[in-house]
Structures are given as C-alpha cells and as structure tokens.
Amino acid sequence: MDDDHTHTSQEGNLEFLQPYKVDGEIFSLPSGEQISMQKYFLTLTPWKGASIPNTYNNKPVVDWNGEPVFAELAVLRLLQSHGWNGVWVDSYRRNYRVGLPDVVDPIEIPQKQKELIDSIRAKTGRSGGCWDVFVWKGDMMLFIELKRQKKDNIRETQIQWLEKSLDYGLTTENFAFIEWKL
C-alpha cells in the first residue's frame, strides 16, 4: 500500500473548520479498542425553494449558497470551496455523487481513491459501511461521517469500516465526524 496519505495532518488542511470544532467523538471498535476522533458541529439552513424531484426517502434538503442539496453534499461543497476534491458515497445506490440524484449523474472516482475504498470493502466483506463523504487533497484522504443531531446514530457497519480502515493503515487523521442540525 502507498502510505503517503497517512502522513499528512488534518490540522493545516482543515483549518477552515476550526469555528465548528467541538469535543472529539469516541468510537468503540469491535476489538474493544476506544478511538477518539475530531468532531465538528454544523448548523445547516433548510431549503425553502421549489421541491426537488427525489428526496431519497425524505432526506432533509438544505440550502447551500442557493443550491438545494442533502447535508452530505453541503459538507462536500464546503470542502470543495477549500480546494478538496471528493464525493458523497451513496452506499444506498452504490454510487459516487457530486450532486443530487436525478439532477447530476453519478461519477467515477480516480483510480487511487477507488483502490483504497475497494481494499477496505474487501477487508469488511461488504459494500456498505463506507463513511458519507470521501475527499482528497494532494496526498491527504479523508472520510467524513455525518449524523443529524438527535435523529441519527452511527451504525455497526460504519464502526467496522473505521476499524478495517485503521487495520489497512489509515489513521484517525483520515477521519472526521460531523454532527449537524437544521
């Protein structure tokens, strides 16, 4: 495995998230190990414009600079505005997205990123569990999980994804947790 992406620190690359930084989140891995990870808290604005064609089973639609998007895409847009490339990992439909379903077609991700996800999926033995947003900038790769405050909890498959990613050679620097509310 090419280890370059495990050596770059989040701090310099995610400085723009400092205003949203809150206490870290503790995850209990199946092995019993406790992992502490950086956590951010975002307040998003509900979309007030025309309804969108596909809300993916009533996902909340938020307003990102006048664009109706899901929370995952709002976080992706925030990172893109700071020089990151990336995708919303749509595990439900097994696609990589940069826009709303039925508005923007799914995309292919670069080979290096695809190989990383495929390798972790092979370790977990399933296609699900990948974290919501996957971004990269230079050699830094980052998986971000979003959870809506008081309405959403981390799933066991996502904890397994984290554990297998760490086994693969990633570090907690390759992960961030975002809690959000409207």
Image (cartoon, grey):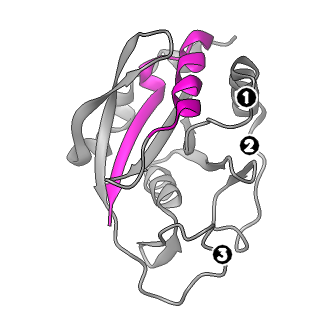
- The C terminus - image quarter: bottom left
Mark 2 closeness class: few <14, some 14–19, many ≥20 residues within 10 Å: some
Question: Amino acid under label 1?
Answer: Lys
For residue 142, above or below residue 82: above
Q: Residue at x 46, y 17 (%)?
A: 29
Question: Amino acid under label 3?
Answer: Asn
Q: Residue at x 34, y 65 (%)?
A: 44
Q: Which residue is mark 1?
A: 112
Examine the structure image and report whether residue 52 is included in the region drawn in magenta: no
Mark 1 closeness class: few <14, some 14–19, many ≥20 residues within 10 Å: few
Q: Which residue is mark 2?
A: 109
- Which residue range is magenta in the image? 154-182
The numbered mark, 1 or 3, whose residue comes first in the sequence reads 3
Q: Is residue 80 left or right of residue 11?
A: right
- Percent of width and height locating residue 178: 37, 45
- The N terminus - image quarter: top right
Q: Residue at x 48, y 39 (%)?
A: 144
Q: How many marks?
A: 3
Question: Amino acid under label 2?
Answer: Ile
Judged from the image, the secondary structure of the residue bearing numbered disc 2 is loop
Mark 3 closeness class: few <14, some 14–19, many ≥20 residues within 10 Å: few
Q: Which residue is mark 3?
A: 54
For residue 74, above or below residue 147: below
- Percent of width and height locating residue 121: 72, 26
Q: Quadrant of residue 180?
A: bottom left
